[in-house]
Image (cartoon, rainbow, N blue to C red):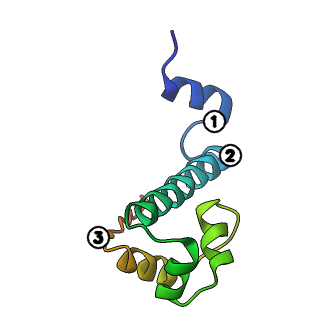
Amino acid sequence: MITIQEFKDKYLGEIGTEVRDRYEQELKVELLAEQIKQLRKKRNLTQEQLGELVGVQRAQISKMENNTGNVTVATLIKIFGALKAKVTFEIEKEIFDIT
């Protein structure tokens, strides 16, 4: 039996490699898009209604929910605000040893 971590390491490369980092980033964006879609539906809003609340077209909401378009951080914050959801960002600073 192989763990998911071992599978990812074997087929995508270890954390820190270009392919693995891109995969992890895309996965996070996909999960974020799904959360927005679920929250929108929970609040009984259409894509058009959510777009109106944040000042964007329905098409942009659709693209974002389907992970096919780019969205700014400012728009994301507006979307989560309209959905009455708390947003937190975690920033990890990579430390380099220069000795």
N-terminal-most mark, 2 or 1: 1
Can residue 98 be seen in this snapshot? no
Task: Check disc 1: other Cα within 10 Å, few if <14, some if 14-19, many if 20+.
Answer: some
N-terminal-most mark, 1 or 3: 1
Q: Pointer 2: what residue?
A: 19
Question: Which amino acid type is marked by label 3?
Answer: Lys
Tell me where residue 88 appears, x and y as whole percent. Answer: 32, 68
Q: Nearer the viewer, residue 49 or 78?
A: 49
Q: Which mark is residue 13?
A: 1
Tell me where residue 80 appears, x and y as whole percent. Answer: 39, 74
Q: Pointer 3: what residue?
A: 86
Tell me where residue 53 appears, x and y as whole percent. Answer: 46, 86
Q: Residue at x 60, y 73 (%)?
A: 61
Q: Residue furthest bottom?
A: 55
Residue 87: image quadrant is: bottom left
**Mark 3 and mark 2: Cα distance apart in space:** 31 Å
Question: Which amino acid type is marked by label 2?
Answer: Val
Q: Residue at x 59, y 63 (%)?
A: 65
Question: Which amino acid type is marked by label 1?
Answer: Gly
Q: Nearer the viewer, mark 3 or mark 2?
A: 3
N-terminal-most mark, 3 or 2: 2
Task: Check disc 3: other Cα within 10 Å, few if <14, some if 14-19, many if 20+.
Answer: few
Q: Are marks 2 and 1 in contact (CB under 8 Å)?
A: yes
**Mark 1 and mark 3: Cα distance apart in space:** 33 Å
Q: Are marks 3 and 2 in contact (CB under 8 Å)?
A: no
Tag 1 secondary structure: loop
Tell me where residue 48 appears, x and y as whole percent. Answer: 58, 78
